[in-house]
Image (cartoon, grey):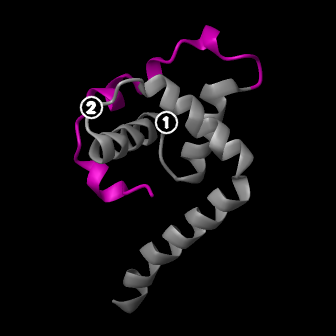
Amino acid sequence: MLDHRRSATSRHPARQHAAAWPQHLDPPGGGVLGTLEEIAAKEQLNLARFVGVLYDEIEGRIGNVQNFTSFLRVTCLHYLRHQELHAQQVAERMTEAVLPLAAD
């Protein structure tokens, strides 16, 4: 689950270099970069922040990140295979984020 609040103050190098993805690695029409941009847009984050959030989460769960590029590819494959699940999870997080505001 993406925790946007935690990563908003994080300054990990992955966030600073996320936009420097080599364009030649993606086929026309998207590939990994296009898919990451699509996921980031649905999460209402820019690409650099989204990649930083992913890095922070994987680092928090397992510690040292050995192959972050591979993790990004797997993230894209999982998203492409389970888009309905992702949409449901995003909707639930957005609802949870709005509910505290409605109570004010």
Q: Nearest the camera: 91 or 82? A: 82
Q: Position of residue 30 (x, y in %)?
A: 71, 26
Q: Nearest the camera: 10 or 98? A: 10
Say if 14 sits above or below 43 in the image.
above
Q: Residue at x 66, y 37 (%)?
A: 77
Q: Earlier in the sequence, mark 1 or mark 2?
A: 1
Task: Identify which amino acid the numbered label 1 is placed on.
Answer: Leu
Q: Which residue corresponds to mark 2?
A: 64
Say if 55 sits above or below 44 in the image.
above
Q: Position of residue 104 (x, y in %)?
A: 33, 89
Q: Which residue corresponds to mark 1?
A: 47
Q: Quadrant of the N terminus?
A: bottom left
Task: Identify which amino acid the numbered label 2 is placed on.
Answer: Asn
Give the foreground label among 1 and 2. 2
Magenta span of residues = 1-29
Q: CA distance from mark 1 to mark 2?
A: 22 Å
Q: Please count the marks in the image.
A: 2
Say if 62 sits above or below 12 in the image.
below
| Residue positioned most to the top | 24
Q: Residue at x 30, y 58 (%)?
A: 5
